[in-house]
Every structure is written in C-alpha cells, then in structure tokens.
Image: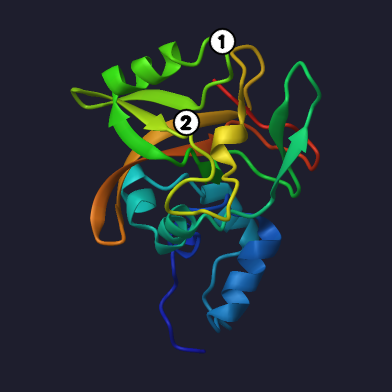
Amino acid sequence: MEGRPVRPAGETSAVTFHTAQTVCSEGLITQEGWTVNWPKPEEIVLQWRPAPKQKVEEDRFVIQCVSQQTWTGLAIKDFGAEQEQGVVATRRFYTNDIVCDYHGKVITEAEGRAIVQSLNDEPGYCFFFKAGERELCVDSQNYPCESHPLTNTFGRRINHSSKMPNLKPFHCKMKINGEDKDIILFKALKDITVGTQLKYD
C-alpha cells in the first residue's frame, strides 16, 4: 500500500503481550500491507517499550487469556517430593512478556489468612496483595476452580523464590465478562528459555 505517511517505529510496535522481535516485526509490516515509508524491523525492536499498565488492562488478548485460561507456552511438571509440582516454559519468553495470571477467587486478606491457618502446614495456594488501600488475597486453594472445572490453571502452580525469580507479579483491574476484577499477572523479569522452571518473588 503506497501513499501512507511515514509511521514512527514505536507506533508499529504496539505490542502488549510479547516483546517486539525482529522476525515478528517483519511479519507485522507485511501483514499490514506496508510497501513504502515503513520503519525497519530493527528500529521497531530498538524503540519498543513495555506497554503501560492501562494498555495491558484493556488488551483484548490478555483479557481473553485471563477469562478463558488459554495461556500458551507453559506446562505443569512434577519436581518430586521436595518441590512437588511447578511450571516450566515450553517456548521462549522475553523480558517483559506477560506469561499468565494467578487465577482464583479474590477475597479479603483476613479470609486468606484464615485459610492458611487452617491448612496445618499443608501447601497453600493463596496470593496476598495490596490494591490501593485494600488488602486482598487470590484464593486458588480449591482445584478445579468453579469457573474452569476442566483446567489446572498455571499460576497457582508457579513456585516462589526470593533468590532466583524470573517472574514479577503485578496488579491490574480488568473487565472480565462485564465485571471489574482484580487480576494478578506475571511478567517475565528476563529472557526465559524452553524447559526453565518459572518462579516469582
């Protein structure tokens, strides 16, 4: 398509889910039909920046993955008696890629602490976080969850590590099935290769 104005490299790389890569950028330019006045793929990669939080919260693909639990590139693996189950990457993730969410029912911190105390040293699946002035907890203790009875969601199986994390959790507000929801997403802290166990701090 000729006659289009020159598009800034950063504008073409409007990627919220994955870090811009040269090969992907070439495909995007071809897909959009640009034949003149397009930025070089290398420029797109160089100028790419992680999407702001608001853009992530409104991204349709991320919302779909959260609501339907259709995250890809992940597998649950049994690491034996010491670690039990965890999650490994089945494809490469790049720094700042959104990997998955910590899925479950959002409850108050007090309700979450009560659940943990009732476990008697058994493994717990509760994620505590602060949203503004609210102290909250994602309760993933029950498996399967009510909304996804056939899915063993990945987030609850990701192990914690304060020394060697490769994921960072962050809080978002998303509209899921017409309702505003508090969501915890995991973002890659660094490039993650295939077969690497995922851990968050």
The image position of residue 151, as x and y in percent, is: 58, 52
Q: Residue at x 50, y 89 (%)?
A: 2
195 and 84: which is toward the camera: 84
Disc 1 marks which residue?
A: 121
Q: Residue at x 61, y 31 (%)?
A: 158
The quadrant holding residue 80 is top right
3 and 89: which is toward the camera: 89
The CA span between labels 1 and 2 is: 24 Å
Side of 138 relative to 95 (left or right): left
Name the secondary structure under disc 1: loop
The image position of residue 156, as x and y in percent, is: 55, 34
Could one spot residue 93 in this view of the protein? yes
The image position of residue 144, as x and y in percent, is: 53, 45
195 and 139: which is toward the camera: 139
Count of number-bearing discs = 2
- Mark 1: few/some/many CA within 10 Å (<14, 14-19, 20+): few
Reply above or below: 67 against 54. below
Disc 2 marks which residue?
A: 169
Q: Nearer the viewer, mark 1 or mark 2?
A: 1
Do the residues bearing badges 1 and 2 touch, measured as CB atoms within 8 Å? Answer: no
Question: Identity of the amino acid at label 1?
Answer: Asp
Question: Identity of the amino acid at label 2?
Answer: Pro
Name the secondary structure under disc 2: strand
Q: In which quarter of the image is the C terminus?
A: top right
115 and 136: which is toward the camera: 115
